[in-house]
């Protein structure tokens, strides 16, 4: 192990101490999250003529079901057993539950033209108009996706080819962000190759996604954008395409994520809050997010950033474990382009197997940017175990003129690590019962000759 950067900063202990996990605050958040209230009206897409034969385009039948729900002030759309091809998006109205029953699969087309006209959405932290997400709800209250069926985004063919061609659109979107271009002028879609999200809720309230399985997304799987009072529970994943983040709360408030089995091609949970100038101009941080009892598998377990310019605060992660290799377990990342803040993050009872880095906090992600350093403070880890870190056990990286502050680690054990701790430009770092590598025993006695 390399102890070059092993530094224990115990200064300031009179003003900063190890904080206990605030269970009462978690309970308060969970209590105020409201589940959607759905009227009693029900309609089966099969009764409207939909065929679960994996061939027929059923878009018009799903649209008719949604229209009938709207006419009846809401209701439940039932998708019975079968494979239902849909050549285009599902657009929600308020007070609707899309119930995908066991043995049922919704399989979306992968023809980009099917997802036009464009809708207001976001792409990597910048608001713009783009292809519609495959399931899209904007300005809706009381909406749900439930059942034990599968949502298949067919993202591994045509959409997968977009990754190599996205640079022009990505760069233009960031330029428009930095120059505060009017959102109505930010038109992408055809010719720009920015992939749509699988499921996106924009400006929605009282959301439930429960028990469904998400497969083969074109881009981010479940994007919670400018929405609040959200419950995600019991869902599972098999989505391994480029940038297949599992759940992305962005400008989101009061979110419960529990009992989720992740297996996706990027971050499991990635908490975001807009990007650069646009994010810093917002007064809507992502906040009050509870993540518990989840199984992590993918690139990273829980990530905050890197698009977090409006700030992220009050995040609580507990009782989670890995079901396979992760590159990083808990990862807080920002850089000098972002600004904003990450604060009041509590992580406890996490069991990791093999990772590249166990706990990683950096204010210099990719070494990019200048002029807008982020504030990172009040981050607390307790009861963390990890079998092996092939690179670093614990990494904390601030700036000399903008230090990371108030980090506590209590009862952390990493059984094997190439590098134990890299701790630079941080103040008030308190470590209690932290073990990396083999635990020391009592000192050996001087041998007698």
Image (spheres, grey):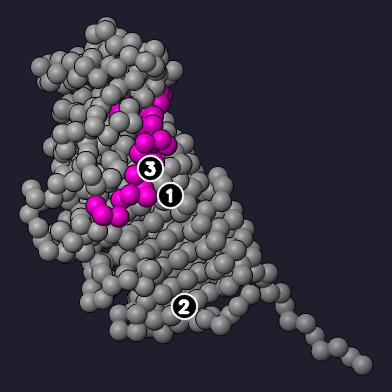
Please tell me whether residue 32 belongs to the stretch shown in magenta: no
> Mark 2 and 3 residues: CB-CB less than 8 Å, in contact?
no
Rounded to the nearest angstrom, the CA distance separating label 2 from label 1 is: 26 Å
Residue depicted at x 18% and y 61%: 175
Q: Earlier in the sequence, mark 3 or mark 1?
A: 3
Which secondary structure lies at badge 2? strand
In the picture of the structure, the residue carrying the numbered disc 1 is 266
Residue 173 horizontal/vertical position (percent): 20, 55
* In the depicted structure, whether residue 383 falls above or below residue 102: below
Q: Which numbered disc, 3 or 1, marks the residue closer to the eye?
A: 3
Which one is in front, 196 or 199? 196
Residue 193 horizontal/vertical position (percent): 28, 45
Which secondary structure lies at badge 3? helix
Residue 202 is left or right of residue 323, and the answer is left
Q: Quadrant of residue 330?
A: bottom left
> Mark 3 and 1 residues: CB-CB less than 8 Å, in contact?
no
Residue depicted at x 38% and y 63%: 332
Residue depicted at x 56% and y 51%: 325
Q: Quadrant of the C terminus?
A: bottom right
* In the depicted structure, whether residue 341 falls above or below residue 168: below
In the picture of the structure, the residue carrying the numbered disc 2 is 423
Residue 215 is left or right of residue 75, and the answer is right
The magenta stretch is 145-169
Q: Quadrant of residue 230?
A: top left
Which secondary structure lies at badge 1? loop
Circle 3 Cα neighbour tier, 10 Å, few/some/many (<14 / 14–19 / ≥20):
some
Please tell me whether residue 156 belongs to the stretch shown in magenta: yes
Q: Earlier in the sequence, mark 2 or mark 1?
A: 1
In the picture of the structure, the residue carrying the numbered disc 3 is 161
């Amino acid at each position: 192990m390399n102890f070059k950067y092993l530094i224990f900063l115990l200064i300031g202990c009179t003003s900063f101490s190890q904080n206990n996990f605030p269970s009462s605050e978690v309970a308060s958040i969970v209590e105020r999250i409201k589940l959607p209230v759905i009227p009693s009206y029900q309609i089966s897409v099969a009764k409207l003529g939909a065929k679960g034969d994996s061939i027929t385009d059923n878009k018009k039948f799903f649209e008719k079901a949604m229209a009938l729900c709207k006419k009846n002030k809401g209701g439940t759309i039932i998708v019975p057993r079968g494979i239902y091809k849909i050549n285009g998006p599902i657009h929600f109205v308020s007070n609707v539950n899309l119930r995908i029953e066991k043995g049922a699969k919704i399989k979306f087309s992968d023809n980009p033209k099917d997802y036009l006209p464009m809708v207001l959405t976001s792409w990597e932290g910048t608001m713009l108009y783009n292809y519609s997400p495959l399931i899209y709800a904007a300005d809706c209250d009381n909406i749900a996706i439930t059942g034990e069926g599968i949502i298949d985004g067919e993202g591994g063919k045509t959409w997968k080819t977009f990754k190599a061609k996205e640079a022009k659109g990505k760069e233009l979107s960031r330029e428009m962000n930095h120059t505060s271009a009017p959102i109505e002028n930010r038109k992408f879609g055809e010719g720009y190759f920015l992939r749509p999200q699988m499921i996106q809720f924009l400006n929605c309230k009282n959301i439930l996604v429960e028990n469904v399985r998400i497969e083969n997304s074109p881009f981010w799987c479940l994007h919670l954008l400018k929405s609040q009072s959200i419950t995600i529970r019991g869902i599972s994943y098999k989505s391994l395409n480029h940038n297949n983040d599992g759940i992305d709360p962005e400008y989101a408030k009061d979110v419960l994520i529990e009992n989720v089995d992740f297996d996706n091609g990027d971050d499991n949970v990635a908490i975001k809050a807009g990007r650069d100038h646009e994010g810093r101009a917002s007064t809507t941080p992502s906040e009050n997010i509870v993540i518990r009892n989840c199984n992590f598998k993918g690139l990273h377990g829980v990530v905050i950033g890197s698009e977090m310019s409006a700030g992220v605060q009050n995040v609580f992660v507990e009782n989670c474990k890995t079901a396979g290799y992760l590159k990083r377990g808990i990862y807080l990342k920002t850089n000098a382009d972002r600004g904003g803040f990450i604060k009041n993050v509590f992580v406890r009872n996490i069991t990791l197997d093999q990772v590249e880095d166990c706990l990683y906090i950096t204010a210099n992600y990719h070494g990019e940017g200048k002029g807008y350093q982020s504030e990172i403070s009040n981050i607390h880890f307790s009861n963390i175990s990890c079998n092996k870190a092939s690179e670093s056990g614990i990494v904390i990286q601030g700036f000399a003129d903008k230090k990371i502050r108030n980090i506590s680690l209590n009862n952390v054990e990493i059984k094997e690590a190439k590098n134990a701790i890299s701790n630079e430009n941080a103040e008030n770092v308190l470590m209690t019962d932290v073990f990396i590598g083999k635990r020391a025993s009592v000192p050996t006695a001087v041998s007698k000759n």
